[in-house]
Every structure is written in structure tokens, then in C-alpha cells.
Amino acid sequence: MKSSLPILFILFFISFNAQSIYSRAYGNRKNPPVIFIHGGPSGNATLFEGTTAQQLANKGFYVIVYDRRGEGRSKDDNASMTFTESFNDLNQLYRIYRIKKANILAHSFGGIIGTLFAGKFPERVSSLTLAGALFTQQETYDHILKEAKEHFKNDPVQLKEISEIENLDKHSAAYRKRCYETASQLNFFDMPSPTPESKNLRAQYEAGEFYQTNIRNPQSPILFYQNEPLNNLDNTAVLKEIKRKGTPVFAVYGKNDGIFSLKQLTDLKNIVGKENFKLLDNCSHYLFVDQQHEFLQFIESKLK
């Protein structure tokens, strides 16, 4: 059942910050809290919220979703898009929803923010779950371009394009953007064989209210790379330290998520432990839609 309090909390949050930070809670606030951190920069939580937030709440969790400042439904022309700003807003969520500790569920670029937050504020994190989340960014970019060179080996125009990308500043919004555009050309974000369930979830989302608010701010990546010096990270050491200090770390990924190499996923499994790592078959980047049942099953089994 949906919480009766989200609108009150949203309004209070807006008033408290004098800025419009979108957030909403699902489920019973007495249940274990889960905070979902979306991808980006320029992303939002609409796909997760529109397909999965209530389903996860039905499993016995208090699920909080939000759009980061300056992204999605949290319009703020003065947003800096830095990690410090993200941490401050996350800590504000804890205060608004009266949470002392929460399970962090981080997707895509949200994995970078979630990992750094868990490392900086371990007392606030019950567990960290990486769900199709970035953790060694340059390895991901290198993997995408390597695969593209093989795929387009007989296409001089595409090979020239890849060479141009490789010569860009690797700490720039343009480099990130063109790497992911290449990944999209290779269908790296697509589920190989959509199931009736996944098709239905996407159709319902596209016909519903959340798709109508699927706002993308193209300035967000530009501001992030302009204002945040830590913009192309390898969080391996941070993850090891989080685990060493006693915070459980879980990882669930799509077996067909093309932006991660087999080496990256093997390295991550070795960090979190075989029992805390799961690869989902016939599943790509948006695993909570591609294989929702298996995704929820994994989250429930680990966080309960």
C-alpha cells in the first residue's frame, strides 16, 4: 500500500530547502528503508518509480525515490551537480523521512554516488546494493570502444569516429556522451529477448504518469564535469574499504549489459563475494524492468 505521507514530505522538503527536490515514499515507514539512487547525470527515477518502487515496497520495504538536484523533476537552475551537493541532499532525505540508516540501492551512475556516500557516511548506510551500477568508469569506456572497434572493423567512417572519441579529454562531458552514444549504437542497453512481462512493464510505464515526467536536463553532465573534479573514478578501493568496515555490499547485474566487461564483473564478484553477487540472464542495463521478478527476489533475499 502506498504511504499516505509522500505529498506532505515533498512539500516540507521543498519548504526546508527553498528549492524543489522531488521525492516520494512507498510502503510502510516502519519497514526497512531503501533509498533508490538513479543514473545520470541528466537521469531521473521515473522508470524505477513507475515500474518497481511499489513492487519493492510490497515486499516489506519503505522505498524512497528522488530526483537529484538539477535533474529530472528536481529543477534547480543553481544546482552545481557536485558530489558534495548530492551528499547534502541525500542527508536531507534522511532528516525529512526521519531515517537513521537506510539500504542504498544504486543504479548506473547512481552507483558512483552511492558508493562514495557509503564510504563517507558509513553510519547512515545499512547496506549498499549496486544494480547495473558504474564502479570502474574508465574500464567501462575502454570496453565500449574496444567492442565498437571490433564491431565496426570494416567500416572506415565508424573507425574514424571511434578514434576521435579516444582522442578526447577523458575527463569531459563530450567523451562520456560519445562513449554512451556508441554503446547505444551497439544495442548495449537493450534486453536481448524481451519477455511478455518486460514488454508489459514498459508499455504501462509509457502510458502512465511517470513517463510524462521523464525529464532530461542536457546541462547536467556539462555542469558536473565543469564543477566536479572527481569525474572519472575507479571505486574499487572504496568498495573494499566499505566492506572491510562491515557494511554489506551486494551486486546485481544483467548478464547482457554490454557496458561492462567480463573482467569488470569478475573483479566485482571477487570484491563483494560470490554469495552477494548475481547475474541475471536475458537482462541488460535496466534490470528492474528486464527481469523484475528475479531482481526483486535478489533484493528481498539480501536486504531481509
Image: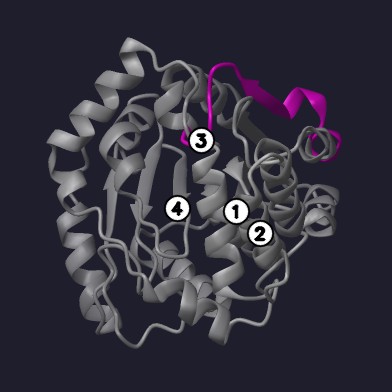
In this picture, is 270 found above or below 122? Answer: above
Q: Give the extent of the magenta segment.
A: 269-286
Cβ atoms at labels 3 and 4 below 8 Å apart? no
Q: Position of residue 293 (x, y in %)?
A: 44, 17
Q: Would you name the residue on which mark 3 appears? A: 187
Real-space CA distance between mark 1 and mark 2, rounded to the nearest whole angstrom: 5 Å
Where does the image place residue 253, in percent across and percent down from the top left?
Answer: 62, 32
Determine whether 39 is above or below 198 in the image: below
Q: Is 36 situated above or below 117?
A: above
Alpha-carbon distance for marks 3 and 1?
Answer: 19 Å
- Given contact means CB atoms under 8 Å apart, are the residues at marks 1 and 2 in contact? yes
Of the two numbered discs 4 and 2 on the same chain, state the one appearing first in sequence: 4
Q: Which residue is mark 2?
A: 160
Q: Reading the chain from its start, which is encountered first: label 2 or label 3?
A: 2
| Residue at 84% over, 51% down | 240
- Residue bearing mark 1: 157
Q: Amino acid at mark 4?
A: His
Where the N terminus falls, by quadrant?
top left
Badge 1 local density, few (<14 within 10 Å), some, or many (20+)? few
The residues tagged by marks 3 and 4 sit, at their Cα atoms, a distance apart of: 21 Å
Q: Which mark is residue 38?
A: 4
In screen coordinates, is 262 left or right of 199? right
